[in-house]
Amino acid sequence: MTTQVSKTVIAAAVAAFLSIPVVAQAGEIRVMCYQDGIECDVTAEQAKRFEAANPGTKVVIDVVPYKTIVEQLPVQLAAGQGPDIARVTDLGGLSKYYLDVSAHVKDRAYWESNFGATLPWLRPTASDKGIYGFMSQLTMTGPFVNKTLFEQAKVALPGPKATWDEWVEAARKVAKATQTPAALAWDRSGHRFAGPAISYGAKIFDAKGDLVLDDGYKTTVNKFVAWHKDGAMLKEVWAGSGGSSYADSIGEFKNGRVAMVLSGSWQINRLQKDIGNAFDWVAVPNPCGPAACSGIPGGAAWVALKTSKSPKEVGMFLDFIASEANYAEFTGKTENIPAHAGLARKGVPYPGATPAARAALASFSAGVATLSPVAYQFQGYKFNRAMMLPTVARVTQAIVGEMSSDEAMTKIGADMADAVKQAQK
Amino acid sequence: MRTLAFFTRTRGRHRLDWTDWLSYLYLGVGLFTLFAPIVWLLMSSLKTESALGQFPPTFLPYSQKTVTVAGHDKPLPLFTVRQADGSLREMAQMRRIGIMATLVDPAQPTQEVRVNINDRKPVSELTFAWSNYTDLFAKFSFGRYLWNSVFITVVATLLTLLINSMAAFALSKYQFRGQKAVFLLIIATLMIPPTIILVPVFLVINSVGLLNSLWGVILPAIATPTGVFLLRQYMLTIPDELLEAARMDHASEWRIYWKIILPLSAPALAVLAIFSVMWRWNDFLLPLIVLSKSEVFTLQLALNSFQGELNTQWHYLLAMTVITLVPITLVFAFLQKYITTGIASAGVK
Amino acid sequence: MHGVDRLLGGFFNLFEPLFRAAQRWLGLSRLGWLFVGPNLLVFGLFTFLPILINLVYASTGGVKLMPLERPFTGAENFAILLECRDYLDIQSCRKDVFWRATFNTAKFSLIQVGLMVGLSLLTALVLNRKIVGRGFWRGVFFYPVLLSPVVVALIWKWLLQSQGVFNAGLLAAGASSVDWLLDAGWAFFWTVFVSIWAHMGFYTLILLAGLQAIPKDMYEAAQLDAASPWRTLRRITLPLLMPNLIVVLVLALIRAVQIFDEVFVLTGGGPGSATTFIVQFIYQTGFAEQIHLYGLAAAASLLLALGLIALTLAQLRLTRASEAGQKAR
């Protein structure tokens, strides 16, 4: 025992020197990245080219799970620590930590013309004119459908203006005919939920611009709970967790346990990889409600952070990956919708995409036009989490029978008010 | 009444009594309940992704045979098909849509046959999907994570043994003012689950500049209340006469601690060492908040962090679970005797 | 071996002069502070200080991380937590999840501790018999204790999924598959079962040690008096095992109230809030949600700590009273 002890002591002493954190050299940029498909891998390749073109700079891409970006990054930033660049989704919530790099980008006009529509999403205040980063992709929530199950059940796919009720009915018939466990599922996310809510007439914002729960939202909650109770919705996705933790339904979709899911365009690459030839899948336009046929836009953005010690290199790197050629490569390889106005006009070649993926991308791109203005406003609102998270937690409780839908609505309202009040302190 | 006899006495006869049989049955059930899940985990970690998705699952890792058919670049899965006339034929499946599958005879690849999925059964062979493990090594900087975990575990254990035994020595063999308060304070922190002080601990570690450093994971965890408690209990049984004799020989207190107390506390130290290894190796929450640069990740962090992404890639998840299990199992296997007798003798006296 | 001794000797020699000097300066009794010092320093910095910071969080509001930037709110967080329109109806409480979590934790602790200590005692009694390969059996029961809670939960989650082994067995036996983790009752059952599965071995060993310390002549004397086995158990075994039993009960209760990792991975607190326990509530409120309500989380954690201290003290007092009562008889 003592031999091992002292050998380890020696080893430990040596290793102690090796493990002392290396102080980041000026010129080294750390990028905290998460990926749904291969976004970080593609960026890492581009980073190597950047390093080659700019000797003396070093770009390190830390691939972390989404959970880290959502839970750890805000805490780090609040404590004054963090990477130089991060790929984030809570655009408004983290905006106070963003670094303005307009002084370090080569051509401001290029940024304004190509990313102008989405740059405001990253600005802390409405009057701000800084450049804090850019959207790595434009995403939209929307449904995917297992076309072959529909074919087997001999049920026609409802048309582009079909309502949610019609889709649920059709999917129900398909599930029955093909012995599928459930008709459909929605991602366990308040962000996904908001699309149908807006379609059903939820205004989300009142006259003053604060969050409000109205009849449209209530109708959606009631319908959603009812669909669970009668077995149309797969219980696992929402009822399988507690609190407001995120869970997606793509896993169930690819295993053929549902005929339809409400997810989003960022899953296209994953669907292509994981489903392959097992069955035919298509993206369909968002089903309609009385008010709209909307999804919610979104996407992850590359943002420069105030904790950076190398703002010049950060600006240069962001410039590099935002350039048309590199952005086109990124979009093409990761099979996303570009947030780049120029590329959206010209079209992006998707070299590795299967016909199914291509069709899905086209469907989503076309769907961008049908997005309700409320959806854009919701996505850009700083405290949208105050509505999204309680929705998930309370609706789940209603689904499992812990409370009625009405009580769930009251609770969502109360939780929302509490959260907004604290956030504004 | 005989029924209860086995609760209270050890039997001395050579012939096995029926109460002995009952005991062994109980132990057998215990063995099955405790180990069957782990054995199942092991076997499942060697299955291919498609085999894992199969329901009902098999115990041994079977995977479907594939065959290369002319005209298709990827090998096609092989099935035994029951045909209309009742005979069985081995065919390769081109695709499966809903409840109908399209199959071809490998020898006649142009003739397609559509068969209901209930009329076909996969042809399986025993396959050990070692790729589940090798892919992981390629995917993650496995060596790096392993090294980080080992470093943290070893250094933290050594430090824990040192300062906990020093504290236990002070609390058991000395009388000084405030001693009781210190002891109670240390024990009282058992009431605080670490999860709860996560954010404040993060703030403290941040302000001493130990974020993203392995030392930021090692140092906060070495003052374990359980360790102090355990060692103190054991040291109380060391006779004071030994210390008095040493003091009369003009030995310094440090010498007494190092040469008398520590060797005599070896069983309790062994128990604490094993617990410390277990705690540090399995530690997840503290590394989670302290380490965010991938080169300092630990093995548990890698496993748990990527759980979200891998949660439908059970084959990788299971393989990684087995990998994190192996070191602690090895330690256990070698030191099993020490652990169980150590707890027995170091147990609360 | 030589190098080892020399290294250890070197370490020893390094500190000896320091301690000798300290001994002369402080005197023998106060030298204790020097020995307890490093532990106290680490403990103070990384446990005690965070608890104090938690107190600051509990008395402030807002969503900022840095304690000094937060607005002081006094006891507002506690008021929010404990506010209920009607104390008999959890639904009417402002933080109904907090109350539900507390209730779930209480239910879980009582059931789990009772079952686990009972099973540990039974197993220890069985292991105390003259059986072949006792060391092996001890190892068998202790092994799950070494596994990390996340690993344990993952294994069981895998077994219990709707297309897992358990349902396969049910279907093979002709029954229909059960939503093991989607049904509130079953999910609760499995949290109890899995936590017992993972921790029983530890307590079994402590009790076994206690049993083996009971001198054999006690039993022989009882045999001579023709005492029934049940009487022997009640009058001899259990009283002599009492110190170990107390330790086991106290530790088990503390751990049960603090349970988090394995349940969170196994059920996520679901379905709904059926298996949401108090530490998960604190974690979610303060850490997981993007609008971090650190103040509420800290207030809840203080309430938890107070509750635990009260419980432990009550437990110790009760067992000491019963001990005294038994001795008096």
Image (cartoon, rainbow, N blue to C red):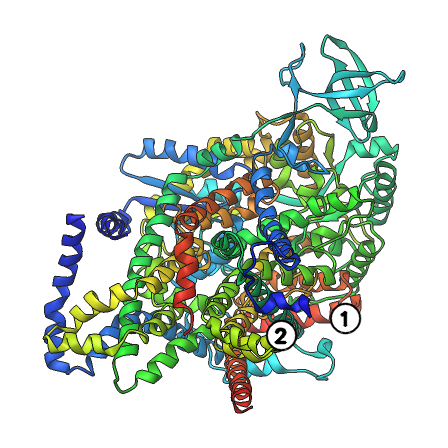
Q: Secondary structure at mark 2?
A: helix
In this image, A226 relative to C150: left or right? right
Task: Where is residue B57? Give x, y as percent.
Answer: 69, 38
Residue placed most toward the observer, A306 or B111:
B111
Q: Secondary structure at mark 1?
A: helix
**Mark 2 lies on residue:** C102
Q: Amino acid at mark 2?
A: Thr
Q: Residues within 10 Å of mark 2 (few under 14, many from 20)?
A: some
Q: Is residue A90 above or below residue B66?
A: below
In this image, B90 relative to C142: left or right? right
Q: Is residue B12 above or below residue B136?
A: below
**Mark 1 lies on residue:** A407
Q: Residue at x 52, y 30 (%)?
A: B131
Classify residue A145 by image quadrant: top right
Same subunit, tags 1 and 2: no
Does residue B291 appear in this view?
yes
Q: Furthest-bottom residue in view?
A: C328
Task: Where is residue B192? Give x, y as percent.
Answer: 47, 73
Q: Is residue C16 above or below residue A181?
A: below
Q: Residues within 10 Å of mark 1 (few under 14, many from 20)?
A: some
Does the CB distance between marks 1 and 2 fall below 8 Å?
no
Q: Dot 2 falls on which chain?
A: C
Q: Amino acid at mark 1?
A: Glu
Residue placed most toward the observer, C43 or B16:
B16
Q: Dot 1 falls on which chain?
A: A
Residue placed most toward the observer, A138 or B4:
B4
Q: Between tags 1 and 2, which lies in front? A: 2
In this image, A117 relative to A199: left or right? left
Classify residue C98 by image quadrant: bottom right
Between the C-alphas of marks 1 and 2, the distance is 21 Å
Task: Where is residue C239? Give x, y as percent.
Answer: 53, 79
Residue placed most toward the observer, A146 or C173:
C173
